[in-house]
Image (cartoon, rainbow, N blue to C red):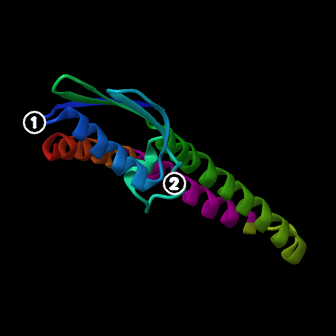
Amino acid sequence: MRYESSTVVKGDSSKALEFAVTVFAGVGFRITSRAENAVELAGPGMNNTRGNPLRGVSAVRVQTDGNRLSLDADLGGVEWISKFLFWFPILLCLGIGVFLSILFLKVLGPGPWIWIVVAVVSINGMLWNVLGPFLSRRIAARTRSALDTLLTNAGSMS
């Protein structure tokens, strides 16, 4: 997932570039390449949804062109969290269903309890099929908003 944006710099574009690099470095990004008017950075990754939304970016290129500051970001952290929110609930529901089925089979023997297990696990799975995509879109929107805010601030700070 890629994201591109740009803004007009109201002052010195090199100061705007340095401001953006400072913000990214403060979040844990490392500089992978640097030129006079461009910087490429690699992100630390996104492990949870409570951290800084900029961590949803796995790689970013910030460059200046005259009085314009542009940003090209790869939202790899957002993609990873989205895949996690898809697969983890499915596998968790399957695991719980198998565990409860084996446990109840050993304790209660064969019986109608299996339908209760199937119903509970299915309802949980359907709930996460609704919540997962919603949370993924929200995380992506927060990351894009943070990138836009960073660009706006960098353009104004110079």
Q: Which numbered marker is on residue 136?
A: none
Q: Quadrant of the N terminus?
A: top left
Measured from the top left, where is residue 116 in percent x and y? 67, 66
Marks 1 and 2: which is nearer the front? Answer: 1
Residue situated furthest front in the rendering: 36
Using the rendered image of the protein, determine whether residue 99 is visible from the camera's viewpoint. yes
Secondary structure at badge 2 equals helix
Residue nearer the viewer, 54 or 19: 19
Q: Position of residue 68 (x, y in %)?
A: 19, 27
Q: Which residue is mark 2?
A: 128
Q: Which secondary structure lies at badge 1?
A: loop
The label shown at residue 10 is: 1
CB-based contact (under 8 Å), mark 1 and mark 2: no
Residue 138 seen: no
Viewed as shown, does residue 33 lie left or right of 121? left
Determine which quarter of the picture holds residue 14. Answer: top left
Q: Which residues are magenta?
A: 114-138
Give, as a three-letter code, the residue at label 1: Lys
Q: Amino acid at mark 2?
A: Trp
The residue at the point 19 percent across, 47 percent down is: 153
Identified at 42% across, 35% down, the residue is 60
Indicate left or right for 91 with 80 as reference: right
Compared with 75, 55 (above or below) is: below
Most extreme residue toward the left, as rendered? 10
Tell me the crowding category of disc 2: few under 14, some 14 to 19, or many 20 or more residues within 10 angstroms, Cα based: many
Rendered location of residue 123, percent (x, y): 55, 59
Rendered position, 142 above or below 95: above
> Main SS of the magenta segment?
helix
Q: Residue furthest top?
A: 65
**Mark 1 / mark 2, whichever is N-terminal:** 1
